[in-house]
Image: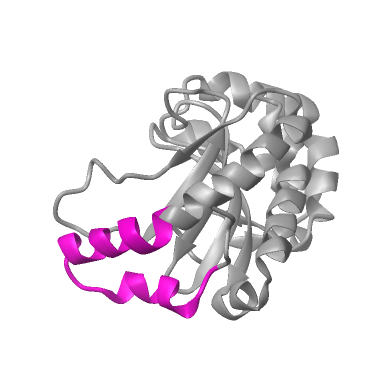
Amino acid sequence: MAFEGFTAKDFQVFAIPGFADRMAAIRKQIQPKFFSLAEEIGPKLKATVGSEVFSHVAKHMRRTVNPPDDTWVAFGPEKRGYKKAQHFKIALSRHCVRILFEVGPEYADKAQWAKAWQREARRLAAALKKGSGLGWFKNEHDEEPAAILASLSPKEIEGLADELTRRKDGQLIFSRRLDQAEALHQTPQGFERAALATFAELSPLYRLG
C-alpha cells in the first residue's frame, strides 16, 4: 500500500489518554503508514548510505503502563534490530514529525564512533551547518531542538559528540523538525522526498558507524 501522507487525526492520537487506547490507535492508524514508508523509502536508502538498510516499526514492547508520546519507523544496518547501531528515524508525535539520525543509548561502541567523529568533525560540522533546518536534540523523544545547527560554530558542533560518552545513557541526535502544519501541507511524495533529502544530508554520520 502506498504512503498516503499524515493527517490531523494522526497527531491527535497522542492526546488519547490511557496506554491501551493510545496503543490501539497507534497500531490501527499510524503503524500502517510507517510500514508503507518503509516500503517506499527503505530500498532507496541503500543507494544513499552504500549498504543494506533494514526498517523497523516501533512496537513499544517495553511499555505496559505509560502511553508513548511518539512513535516511529527506524532504518538501520541490522536486520534483528536498530538500537545497537547508528540509524535513521521518522518519528511522529503530538505537534511534529522529526526526520532524524541517532546514535542511541544502546549503541554498541560509542567510544569508537566518537573517535571517528573527531577525525571527521571539521568537515562534518561544515556540512551539517548547511543542512535544511537541521537541529541538535538532547533526547530522541524531544519535540523541540536544543539548538539549530546553523546557529552554532563548527567548534560547538564538534563538541556535541561528547554527549555520547559523558554518561552511560548518552546519545546524539540530529534532526529536521516539521511542525504539524508543515507536515500536513506536504503531499505524500513531497514528504518522501523531504525525508530522503534529510537522510542524504545526514548520511555521512550514518557511514561513520
Query: In the figure, is residue 129 to the left or right of 191?
Result: right
Instruction: Say which residue appears at 72% left-offset and 28% top-offset.
Output: 118
Q: Is residue 12 magenta?
A: yes
**Which of the 4 image quadrants contains residue 57?**
top left
| Along the viewing direction, whichever of 149 and 79 lies nearer the viewer | 79
| Along the viewing direction, whichever of 136 and 96 lies nearer the viewer | 96
Residue 208: x and y, percent?
69, 26
Let me know if residue 209 appears in the view: yes
| Along the viewing direction, whichever of 6 and 74 lies nearer the viewer | 6
Instruction: Say which residue appears at 60% left-offset and 50% top-offset.
Output: 100
Q: Is residue 7 magenta?
A: yes
Residue 207: x and y, percent?
71, 27
Q: Main secondary structure of the magenta part?
A: helix
Residue 82: x and y, percent?
47, 31
Instruction: Say which residue appears at 58% left-offset and 66% top-offset.
Output: 5
Query: In the figure, is residue 31 to the left or right of 27?
Result: right
Residue 109: x and y, percent?
51, 19
| Magenta-tinted stretch | 6-31
Query: In the figure, is residue 53 to the left or right of 155?
Result: left
